[in-house]
Image (cartoon, grey):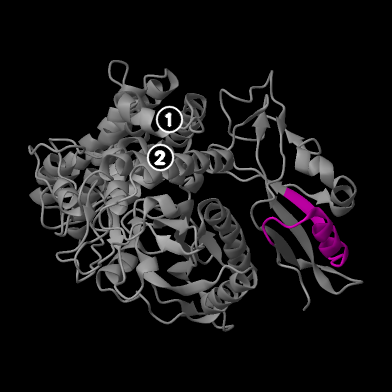
């Protein structure tokens, strides 16, 4: 099948027109702008319009949207809603094929050319893609100036005066749950399978195998260079019905592909999610990218890899994080500075990483998701190590100097990767500026300091490095004392912008991540937080309370009566109003509707605790009924 999958970055207009005219199966154009929530726009513009008005598409005058169509609160308002959408020619354009809509004359699937675009309001770029692109331009300029002023960088075998360009590289690992539509999975069975590690990297079967193989094949056709697709930690064995169809599918899958330029990597992620979902749906399967689709089971992470390279006058590319002698140093001074900047300023990066109830539900002990702001380097430079319990780990390969990078493990498939990377590289710049005048020995000491020890950059009362199992080797109290207390709710996380103004200044310094952008992101996140609590989470928890009913039994012991009395009191506290006293659900709903978010945040935490207590009590109660 002779299909066109990619129009390469920086292609000339005349070449693009020639390619499209040679592929009449591509009938539509869709401009992909990304708002503050990470949502991507999608339209069906007839190809004839694009071919005729291509210059207008480049200029941003061909297509407009409005503030009600995208999440840009406080920017594109209803009385000032016009948003222009110029295309971005500096990245790859992908063709999305609909294999359920075959052109009868061509006998080919109908294609839509998806073109990454910017969103412009009142002459300013206000979208997530622009924030990242403009941030990287600023960081690049400052780093080039810094390296030229400090040419002898500890642990780095490149003269700063020879550096002419900087490359920012990233990659994301996509995890997803696959299930049979409308079927309810057994949480107990899935949990047991997870603990017993029965599914991790197991063989796939039936429709799941077919869909996974098709995903790997299709993504390679788009030039994404897939490295692996495999089963993740969660899942259980499917069943076969009398007709030979696979039923009761509930499996977790991971797909990894090659790194790219940071903006391109974020674009790739959005397209991969779209393609994977369609391929599995074509096989009759439902895909969830939610961070925590099922409470009590492993969630979906999207480990985000952060790298940096420099280009020298001779055209050679050098990994900026790799030490000149990898058996002597863990990394160069640039690498030390980058990870220190990331960790020190993480409070204002975290809101972009975890902006939903779902994302924070995933970051709990026991599920291989990070719970502390801490890194791991390994016990000795000569032996690369990967500690899967830390927030940001150092990945190295002694045989491949290009492999050195950091893996940010807290992200999930719905984290806004554009904004995460923009904040992360800004924070890295701050750390690198502090590090380039120090030796690698001094930087290792700084990163490894104990709480209470003075440092030249990192905060005195915190630790930032651990080679231990953070989940099991520390109590919750010890973790909080060493590495700080993680936010429990979306409100708490968004409050970090106000609580840490000096760190907010780091990520806004370049001008792209300006206050207007942060406020739009925060307002959108808080609106979704409030709406989800009122419309989904509280009703779901109310159903849990209603289902915890007294069981009729001929033989009731004092233990049964005692358990039921506790359950009955907890049910009333959660869900039953009286004239004088309101239930926890009502108090939480009222606080949200009144805009008292601080109170609502505390009540949300209490609600989660009480619901878990109720479920535990009811389980104990029913197990004693015979």
Q: Quadrant of residue 119?
A: top right
In the picture of the structure, the residue carrying the numbered disc 2 is 426
Residue drawn 52% across and 67% down? 180
Residue drawn 87% across and 45% down? 53
Q: Are marks 1 and 2 in contact (CB under 8 Å)?
A: yes
Magenta stretch encompasses residue 13: yes
User: Along the line of sight, which residue is nearer the eye, 493 or 313?
Assistant: 313
In the picture of the structure, the residue carrying the numbered disc 1 is 509
Residue 117 point in image, percent of width and height: 67, 44
Element type where label 1 sits in the image: loop
Quadrant location of the N terminus in the rendered image: bottom right
Q: Earlier along the polypeptide chain: callout 1 or callout 2?
A: 2
Residue 19 point in image, percent of width and height: 82, 64
Q: Residues within 10 Å of mark 1 (few under 14, many from 20)?
A: some
Give the answer, above or below, for where 358 lies relative to 506.
Answer: below
Residue 83 point in image, percent of width and height: 70, 31
For residue 245, say whether it is visible. Answer: yes
Give the answer, above or below, for where 377 lies relative to 475.
Answer: below
Report whether 336 appears left or right of 400. left
Report whether 22 appears left or right of 354. right
Report whether 259 appears left or right of 344. right
Residue 316 point in image, percent of width and height: 48, 64
Q: Quadrant of residue 304?
A: bottom left
User: Along the line of sight, which residue is nearer the eye, 94 or 45?
Assistant: 94
Where does the magenta region start and end? 8-30
Give the answer, above or below, for where 494 lies relative to 365.
Answer: above
Give the answer, above or below, for where 20 lies relative to 604.
Answer: below
């Amino acid at each position: 099948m002779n299909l066109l999958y990619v129009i390469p970055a920086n292609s000339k207009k005349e070449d693009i027109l020639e390619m499209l005219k040679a592929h009449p199966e591509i009938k539509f154009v869709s401009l992909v702008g990304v708002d503050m929530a990470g949502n991507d726009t999608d339209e069906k513009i007839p190809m004839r319009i694009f071919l005729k008005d291509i210059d207008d598409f480049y200029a941003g005058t061909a297509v407009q949207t409005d503030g009600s169509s995208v999440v840009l609160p406080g920017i594109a308002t209803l009385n000032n809603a016009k948003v222009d959408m110029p295309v971005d020619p500096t990245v790859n354009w992908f063709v999305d094929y609909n294999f359920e809509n075959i052109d009868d004359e061509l006998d080919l699937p109908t294609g839509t050319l998806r073109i990454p675009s910017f969103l412009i309001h009142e002459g300013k770029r206000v979208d997530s893609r622009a924030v990242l692109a403009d941030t990287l331009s600023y960081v690049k300029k400052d780093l080039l100036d810094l390296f030229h002023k400090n040419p002898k960088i500890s642990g780095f075998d490149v003269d700063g005066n020879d550096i002419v360009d900087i490359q920012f590289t990233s990659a994301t690992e996509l995890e997803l749950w696959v299930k049979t539509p409308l079927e309810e999975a057994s949480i107990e069975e899935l949990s047991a399978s997870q603990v017993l590690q029965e599914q991790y990297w197991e063989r796939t079967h039936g429709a799941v195998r077919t869909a996974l193989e098709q995903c790997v094949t299709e993504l390679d056709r788009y030039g994404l260079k897939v490295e692996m697709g495999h089963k993740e930690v969660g899942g259980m064995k499917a069943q076969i019905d009398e007709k030979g169809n696979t039923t009761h599918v509930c499996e977790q899958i991971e797909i990894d592909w090659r790194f790219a330029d940071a903006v391109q990597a974020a674009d790739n992620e959005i397209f991969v999610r779209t393609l994977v979902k369609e391929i599995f749906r074509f096989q009759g399967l439902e895909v969830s990218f939610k961070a925590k689709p099922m409470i009590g089971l492993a969630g979906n992470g999207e480990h985000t890899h952060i790298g940096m390279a420099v280009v020298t006058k001779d055209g050679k590319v050098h990994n900026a994080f790799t030490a000149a002698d990898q058996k002597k140093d863990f990394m160069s001074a640039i690498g030390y500075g980058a990870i220190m900047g990331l960790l020190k300023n993480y409070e204002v990066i975290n809101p972009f990483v975890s902006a939903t109830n779902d994302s924070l539900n995933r970051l709990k002990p026991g599920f291989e998701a990070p719970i502390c702001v801490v890194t791991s380097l390994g016990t000795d430079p000569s032996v690369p190590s990967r500690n899967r319990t830390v927030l940001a780990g150092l990945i190295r390969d002694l045989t491949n100097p290009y492999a050195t990078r950091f893996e940010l493990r807290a992200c999930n498939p719905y984290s806004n990767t554009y904004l995460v990377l923009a904040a992360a590289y800004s924070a890295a710049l701050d750390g690198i500026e502090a590090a380039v005048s120090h030796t690698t020995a001094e930087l290792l000491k700084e990163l490894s300091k104990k709480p209470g020890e003075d440092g030249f950059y990192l905060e005195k009362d915190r630790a930032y490095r651990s080679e231990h199992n953070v989940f099991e080797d520390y109590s919750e109290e010890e973790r909080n004392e060493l590495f700080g207390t993680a936010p429990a709710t979306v409100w708490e996380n968004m409050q970090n912008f106000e609580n840490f103004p000096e760190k907010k200044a780091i990520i806004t310094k370049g001008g792209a991540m300006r206050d207007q952008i942060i406020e739009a992101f925060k307002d959108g996140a808080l609106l979704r937080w409030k709406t989800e609590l009122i419309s989904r989470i509280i009703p779901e928890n109310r159903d849990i309370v209603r289902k915890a009913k007294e069981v009729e039994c001929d033989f009731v012991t004092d233990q049964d009566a005692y358990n039921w009395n506790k359950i009955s009191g907890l049910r009333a506290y959660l869900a039953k109003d009286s004239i004088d006293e309101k239930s926890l659900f009502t108090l939480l709903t009222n606080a949200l509707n009144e805009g008292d978010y601080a109170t609502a945040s505390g009540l949300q935490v209490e609600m989660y605790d009480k619901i878990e207590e109720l479920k535990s009590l009811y389980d104990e109660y029913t197990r004693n009924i015979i």
